Image (cartoon, grey):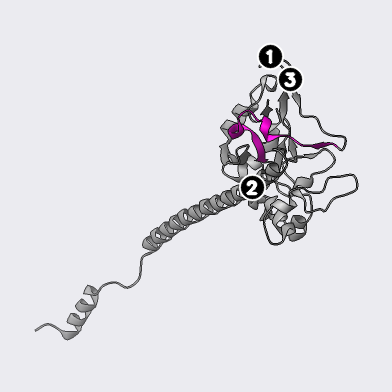
Amino acid sequence: MRNPTEMRARGRSLRPRAGFTLTELSVLMGVGVILASVVAADLDQARMKLLQQACAANLKQWGMAIDLYSQDFDGTYYMGGTSSSLPWDDLVGYPTMVTNVYLPYVGGGDVTQRIRTMRTCPFVAAKLTQAQLDSSAPHSYSMSIPSVRWGESPFGPYATLTADKQNNYWPSLKLVRNPATYLLLIDSSHFTLSCGGLIATVNGIPYGDNTPPIARHGGAVNCLFGDFHVELVSSNKVAQQAAINCAIGEPWFEMN
């Protein structure tokens, strides 16, 4: 007959072992870190996508405002001037400046707050204080200064649109040759944009943020075009447009 003590010892040795070895714990921790990094990357991509879509929504709101305004004023729209950036502001006007003509067209509710939301890319707005957002400085979008054809030759030189005596510009959408390729607004680091300045506009360092516009949305920028559609434009396409000789007509800036 076996010794009861020996049998109890044997039984204990056959029982499942409790806990994990150090190696097993290391493997589990490694798997956990990998899963956490994957989830974090997915969340970051989702956040960036939401910010890009919110930025595009801002431009769509500006497109609606410009469209409604132009319908009331025979196709013209206000792009501001060298002395002010009033299209972006919630100001009621100064003696020597034009009142922000888009205030009646930006929708209902508090138009001041609406303008302050529409004028700033959400990627930038997330990094600014409320005081900065309420100031007139942090504008995230540029209006382009159109180039207009002059002379007889279709490939002749182009002149920049002429400002009025108060340095304000009133381009006419009726003169746009190809509205779907005519740049109205671009996610940028400047207030106004001339032909040849695309690279500087999307690669520059904007107010209140150290992230170039081209890097906010994964190497692309949101653009509003003359037919009022919004498009996420890649850095490659921006570079291709910037390489076009403005003297023979840049489609993004060109009027008849």
Residue linked to disc 1: 153
Tell me whether the residue at label 1 lies in contact with that at label 2, contact meaning CB atoms closer than 8 angstroms. no
Left or right: residue 175 versus residue 12 is: right
Which stretch appears magenta? 167-186
State which quarter of the image contains the C terminus: top right
In the foreground, 148 or 218? 148
Residue 240: image x %, image y %? 59, 27
Numbered disc 1: secondary structure:
loop
Residue 196: image x %, image y %? 70, 27
* Residue furthest right as drawn: 95
Residue that appears at 79% across and 44% down = 85
Residue that appears at 62% across and 40% down = 223
Left or right: residue 41 versus residue 121 is: left
State which quarter of the image contains the N terminus: bottom left
Answer whether residue 232 is magenta in the image: no
Q: Earlier in the sequence, mark 1 or mark 2?
A: 2
Q: Residues within 10 Å of mark 2 (few under 14, many from 20)?
A: some
Query: Dividing the picture into quarters, in which one does residue 109 lie?
Result: bottom right
**Residue 53 appearing in the image:** yes
Mark 3 → mark 1, Cα distance in angstroms: 8 Å
Residue 249: image x %, image y %? 67, 22
Residue that appears at 76% across and 29% down = 161
Q: Earlier in the sequence, mark 2 or mark 3?
A: 2
Left or right: residue 2 versus residue 23 is: left
Mark drawn on residue 150: 3
Mark drawn on residue 64: 2
